[in-house]
Image (cartoon, rainbow, N blue to C red):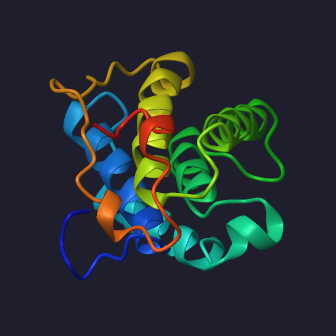
C-alpha cells in the first residue's frame, strides 16, 4: 500500500485487500485456495469495486472484495443456502466495521479494518486460523489523504 502508484483513495486498495486475504488463505493451507480462485476473486472485485461508490451507494469496494473471497471459498451461489447466507453475514460484518471508521473515508484504514475482521471471520466461517500482524499497524499515509486524515480518531494513526 505504500507504493507511490497505489493511490490513497481508490479501488486498487480493494484489490490489495482481496489479494492479501486470498494469499493468506492459500499460504495457511486449510482451504486449498488455487491461483484460479485468486484470479476469480480479483475479477469479481474489479466488477464491483468502482471509484466513488462508497459515497454514492454506501458500499466501499473493499466490502465486495472481501465478500468475493468468502463466496469463492465457501462456494456461494444464488442456488445455494448456507454458503450464500454465510457470505452475506461476512459482508454485513465487514461493512459494519468499516462504517465505524468513516469521516472522511480512508481506503488504507478500510483495508486494515477489513483484513482484521476477515481474520476473525475466517476462524468462524472457514475454521481457518490466520495470524494477526505481529506488530501494531501504524499508518504512514496521513499526509497523502486528499480530504484530511481523521488522525486521532483512527486506530492506525500515531
- Residue nearest the viewer, comparing 89 with 142: 142
Q: Kindly identify the residue that appears in the image at 68 percent across and 46 percent down.
A: 76
Q: Position of residue 79 (x, y in %)?
A: 83, 49
Residue placed most toward the observer, 81 or 25? 25
Which percent across, then down, holds residue 33?
34, 46
Which is nearer the eye, 26 or 79? 26
- Judged left or right of residue 45, residue 8 is left
Number of marks: 0
Which quadrant of the figure has residue 130? top left
Query: What x and y, as percent, mark residue 142?
Result: 34, 58
Query: The N terminus lies in which quarter of the figure?
Result: bottom left
Q: Is residue 109 above or below residue 156?
A: below
Q: Residue at x 53, y 25 (%)?
A: 121
Residue in the picture at 68% in, 43% down:
99
- In the rendered view, does 81 fall on the left or right side of 31? right
Q: Is residue 25 above or below residue 35?
A: above
In this rendering, the answer to whether 131 lies above or below 6 is above
* Foreground pick, 62 / 143: 143
Side (left or right) of 93 relative to 69: right
Q: Quadrant of the C terminus?
A: top left
Amino acid at each position: 500500500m505504500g507504493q507511490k502508484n497505489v493511490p490513497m483513495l481508490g479501488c486498487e486498495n480493494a484489490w490489495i485487500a482481496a489479494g492479501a486475504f486470498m494469499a493468506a488463505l492459500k499460504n495457511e493451507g486449510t482451504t486449498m485456495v488455487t491461483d484460479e480462485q485468486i484470479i476469480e476473486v480479483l475479477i469479481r472485485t474489479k466488477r464491483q469495486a468502482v471509484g466513488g461508490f462508497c459515497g454514492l451507494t454506501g458500499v466501499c469496494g473493499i466490502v465486495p472484495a472481501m465478500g468475493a473471497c468468502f463466496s469463492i471459498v465457501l462456494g456461494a451461489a444464488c442456488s445455494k443456502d448456507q454458503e450464500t447466507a454465510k457470505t452475506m453475514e461476512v459482508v454485513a460484518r465487514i461493512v459494519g466495521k468499516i462504517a465505524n471508521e468513516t469521516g472522511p473515508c480512508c481506503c488504507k484504514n478500510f483495508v486494515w479494518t477489513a483484513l482484521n475482521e476477515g481474520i476473525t471471520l475466517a476462524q468462524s466461517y472457514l475454521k481457518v486460523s490466520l495470524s494477526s500482524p505481529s506488530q501494531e499497524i501504524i499508518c504512514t499515509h496521513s499526509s497523502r489523504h486528499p480530504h484530511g486524515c481523521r488522525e486521532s480518531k483512527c486506530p492506525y494513526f500515531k
